[in-house]
Image: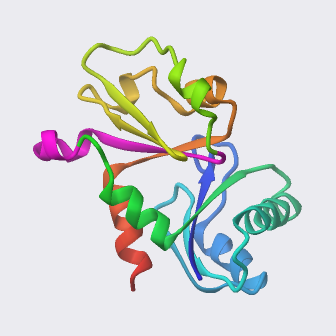
Amino acid sequence: MKYIALLRGINIGSKNRIKMADLRTIFESMGYENVKTYLQSGNVIFDADSDNETKIADRIEKKINKTFGFSVNIIIRTESELKDIVNNNPFIEENRTEIDKFHVTFLKEKPDKETVLNLDLNNNENEKFEVIGREVYLHLPNGYSRTKLTNNTFEKKLKTIATTRNWKTATKLLELSKK
């Protein structure tokens, strides 16, 4: 099965540095095949025999910790899930020209409905977000660097691990997974 691993918090500043060649080597050493990385921010596409995303993520997290001496959270999506994520962005139709203003926050676990319904965030009035399943779709006209709708905010409010990718990266990962 084809998977996409999204690593949270690597290669940002001087902390938690991993070269993509080393990351590919780690995945290959664990028996994963057709390993590809995209950008320096920890996006890995690979094939695995297992259909248990949780076990795959745990295994990769342990291997990275053992190899590099720091913890990294891993969020896994299948190629099929990523296709659905890209196809179900609720903001695309009304704002087709603003692709660079879209982001998606991937959540490790699906938050419960009550938590989502009671989500009270102090965001700018022109910013929009929608939680669908294990994703938070974002439309940020002022850019991600100016928003309060960050990984940390969603992790706190939804009580799960999160990592965000811009829309260009999300769609490129889907494209690369098909090759």
Q: Residue furthest right?
A: 66
Magenta part of the chain: 92-109
| Residue at x 70%, y 66% (from the top left corner) | 53
Horizontal arrangement in the rendering, residue 22 relative to residue 113 (left or right)? right
| Quarter of the image where the N terminus is located | bottom right
Above/below status of 75 relative to 142: below
Q: Quadrant of residue 55?
A: bottom right
Please, which colouring scheme is shown?
rainbow
Q: Position of residue 32 (x, y in %)?
A: 69, 84
Q: Position of residue 48 (x, y in %)?
A: 67, 83
Horizontal arrangement in the rendering, residue 150 relative to residue 11 (left or right)? left
Above/below status of 97 relative to 116: below
| Residue at x 78%, y 59% (from the top left corner) | 61
Q: Quadrant of residue 130?
A: top left
| Residue at x 31%, y 59% (from the top left corner) | 87
Q: Position of residue 21 (x, y in %)?
A: 61, 75
| Quarter of the image where the C terminus is located | bottom left
| Residue at x 54%, y 17% (from the top left corner) | 118
Q: Identify which residue, 11 or 30, lies in the foreground.
A: 30
Q: Identify which residue, 15 or 164, lies in the foreground.
A: 164
Q: Position of residue 56 (x, y in %)?
A: 75, 69
Q: How many marks?
A: 0
Q: Residue furthest left?
A: 97
